Image (cartoon, grey):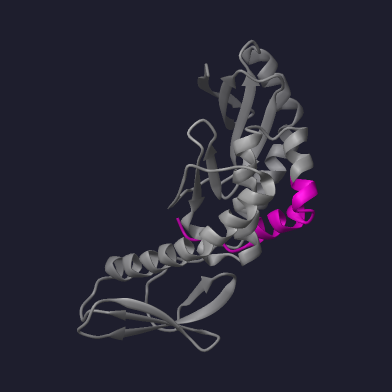
């Protein structure tokens, strides 16, 4: 596929433009940072794109302000009684130093136990917890893939987990690969399921066109509410 990229500035807003072999122009503002992106047909001029952005500038700025106002955790210091999240649950961190391999465990309904070697640094503690989150996602995602690949009649060649600043998930439809944001381990399970369904549908419908929306409406009727809930959830500190 022929793809051209550039960046435009319109009304003080930086916009990433991707031109490719599509029929219609699509404009989106993406959480968590309010990144603005336009996908446009190859033949559409910069001036036409500018006019489309100007027409939506008020909406773009409202969306970005909504993302900026979203609750954001302060920098995690990885000390006792600090708040952390798992599948939407608020947990209080307890740090235990022990001379054994690091591990993480949930105790009761509200405690997250972090076991680390004596003298472990803040970065080392963060790495242990991040690895635990990754392990949890690796256990949670396969059943969702098994369910929804059957329902949607799609098949992904590979999937992975990584930290992403501007997207909850992404899809490479040509390679049939999807990526999920590590932060999803902290969000409610229904949010994880929504992102999995969203990215799997992109294997069949690469763009957010009417066919894509219709399939979401058909198979996950509450997706708009779940999407709003996901975007209201507390963000990690940058």
Q: Position of residue 19 (x, y in %)?
A: 58, 19
The picture places residue 154, in percent across and down from the top left corner, at 61, 42
Relative to 70, 119 lies left or right:
left
Q: Which quadrant of the view contains residue 81? A: bottom left
Q: Residue 96 at x, y = what percent?
A: 31, 86
Q: Specify the segment rendered in magenta.
A: 216-238
Quarter where residue 56 is shown: top right
Instruction: Please give left or right for residue 134 compared with residue 216 in the image.
Output: left
Q: Is residue 45 left or right of residue 98?
A: right
Q: Quadrant of residue 153?
A: top right
Depicted 42 relative to depicted 109: above or below: above
Above or below — where is 112 with respect to 226?
A: below
Q: Residue 194: horizontal and vertical position, in percent?
A: 65, 54
Tell me which residue sits at (52%, 79%) in the image.
Answer: 91
Q: Is residue 71 visible?
A: yes
Quadrant in which the C terminus appears: bottom left
Q: Is residue 224 magenta?
A: yes
Q: Is residue 163 left or right of residue 48?
A: left
Up/down of 133 relative to 1, above or below: below
Q: Main secondary structure of the magenta part?
A: helix
| Number of numbered discs | 0
Please report the residue visible at 58 percent of the width from the left and 19 percent of the height from the top.
20
* x 53%, y 19%: residue: 1
Residue nearest the viewer, comparing 3 with 123: 3
Residue 67 visible somewhere in the drawing:
no
Q: Is residue 100 above or below residue 214?
A: below
Residue at left 52%, top 89%?
Answer: 108
Can residue 199 be found in the magenta stretch? no
Q: From this viewpoint, which residue is outermost toward the bottom?
A: 108
């Amino acid at each position: 596929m022929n793809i051209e990229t550039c960046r435009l500035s319109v009304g003080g807003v930086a916009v990433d433009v991707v031109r490719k072999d599509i029929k219609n122009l699509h404009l989106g503002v993406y959480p968590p940072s309010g990144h603005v992106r336009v996908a446009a047909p190859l033949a559409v001029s910069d001036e036409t794109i500018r006019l489309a952005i100007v027409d939506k500038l008020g909406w773009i700025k409202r969306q970005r302000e909504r993302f900026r106002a979203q609750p954001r955790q302060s920098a995690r210091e990885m000390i006792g009684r600090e708040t952390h999240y798992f599948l939407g649950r608020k947990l209080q961190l307890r740090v235990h130093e022990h001379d054994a391999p690091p591990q993480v465990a949930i105790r009761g309904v509200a405690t997250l136990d972090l076991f680390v070697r004596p003298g472990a640094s803040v970065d080392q503690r963060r790495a242990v917890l991040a690895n635990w989150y990754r392990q949890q996602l690796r256990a949670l995602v396969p059943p969702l893939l098994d369910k929804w690949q059957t329902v949607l009649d799609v098949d992904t060649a590979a999937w992975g987990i990584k930290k992403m600043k501007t997207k909850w998930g992404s899809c490479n439809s040509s390679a049939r690969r999807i990526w999920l944001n590590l932060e999803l381990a902290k969000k409610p399970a229904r949010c994880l399921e929504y992102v999995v369904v969203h990215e799997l549908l992109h294997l069949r419908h690469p763009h957010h066109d009417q066919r894509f929306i219709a399939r979401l409406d058909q198979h996950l009727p509450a997706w708009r509410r779940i999407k709003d809930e996901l975007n209201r959830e507390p963000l990690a500190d940058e």
